[in-house]
Image (cartoon, rainbow, N blue to C red):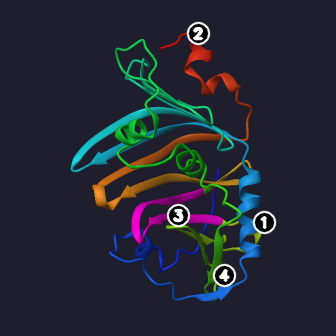
Amino acid sequence: MKTVSIITLALVPLLFACFPQIPEIHLNEVPAGPLLRALDQRRQAFAGLTGMAVVRVERKGRKRTFDNVGIALSAQSGLRMEAFGPLGQSLITLVWDGQEIQLRLPGQDSILTPGQAGLEKLLGVGLEPTELAAALSGNVPEFDQSAVIKAFCAQGGDCVVEVRQADMLRRITMAFPASPEERGGNIIIIESALYRSGKLIFAARFEQGEEVSKYVMPKNIVFRDPDKKASFTVSYSEVEVNGAIPDKAFSLINAEGAGP
């Protein structure tokens, strides 16, 4: 894997902090079209991944770490996360097939369908499955056509895309690889922050970008919900990008021949 150097904006720590109001953007407004196309090209360059990771969950001072978590992800439409014990036994399995969340807990043969509330209880941070799946590949979900979109850039080329829809506001901070030979037309997302009615709901920060199969993957992804004093961190130890993944990986019922 090839380490990719990027220029980190001084703005990033401000976006990631907890503010009572949405922080102002002190950058020059630019046409949004080229940046939206770059985000779309990044999504299209990703077909899926398989990997192992360390997952850390913290909420109100309580911490839990899973040292061996297998992750399979298919283009933001299917997700499987399975935590293994020291002897290789399956502890917790979470799958999402693009519509329904399925969960199997330790010591239970039955399969639960906990919905959004169950996902938040498990991860500590209130993430929708689409948000989680996109972020695990260093992406953001596609935008609704009714959204109002603006873009701002610094002189060095690092930019912020702002997406407004109803009472929701998303800010995406992105950068370009520092050296021309590393750029290849690819942008790197540094952070995605989501606000509702001016309040920060969560922020996802993408760290340690490395090139894997010509796709820049963040090795470390940190989700935070300041209001709930919660964080959820995924640190990849190994990852393969754009390999084939069978659809049965995203259903506990189909893959295991069992039901609730």
Q: Is residue 166 visible?
A: yes
Q: Which residue is mark 2?
A: 257
Residue 157's label in the rendered image is 4
The kind of residue tagged 3 is: Ser
Asked whether 189 falls inside the magenta stretch, the response is yes
Sequence-wise, the earlier of marks 4 and 1 is 4
Q: 164 or 223, which is in the foreground? A: 164
Sequence-wise, the earlier of marks 3 and 1 is 1
Q: 213 or 199, which is in the foreground? A: 199
Q: Which residue is mark 1?
A: 184
Q: Label 2 near label 4: C-beta < 8 Å?
A: no
Q: Quadrant of residue 43?
A: bottom right
Asked whether 243 falls inside the magenta stretch, the response is no
Alpha carbons under labels 2 and 3: distance apart: 38 Å
Left or right, residue 40 beside residue 173 = right
Instruction: Name which residue lies at 62% across and 32% down.
Output: 97
Vertical order, 205 against 81 (above or below)? below
Left or right, residue 212 beside residue 66 = right
The kind of residue tagged 1 is: Gly
Please state the extent of the stretch shown in magenta in the rendering: 188-209
Residue 182: percent from left, percent from top: 72, 66
Instruction: Name which residue lies at 63% across and 64% down.
Output: 188
Q: Residues within 10 Å of mark 3 (few under 14, many from 20)?
A: many
Q: Residues within 10 Å of mark 4 (few under 14, many from 20)?
A: few
Q: Which SS class for mark 1? A: loop
Q: Which SS class for mark 2? A: loop
Q: Residue furthest top?
A: 257
Residue 192's label in the rendered image is 3
Sequence-wise, the earlier of marks 1 and 2 is 1
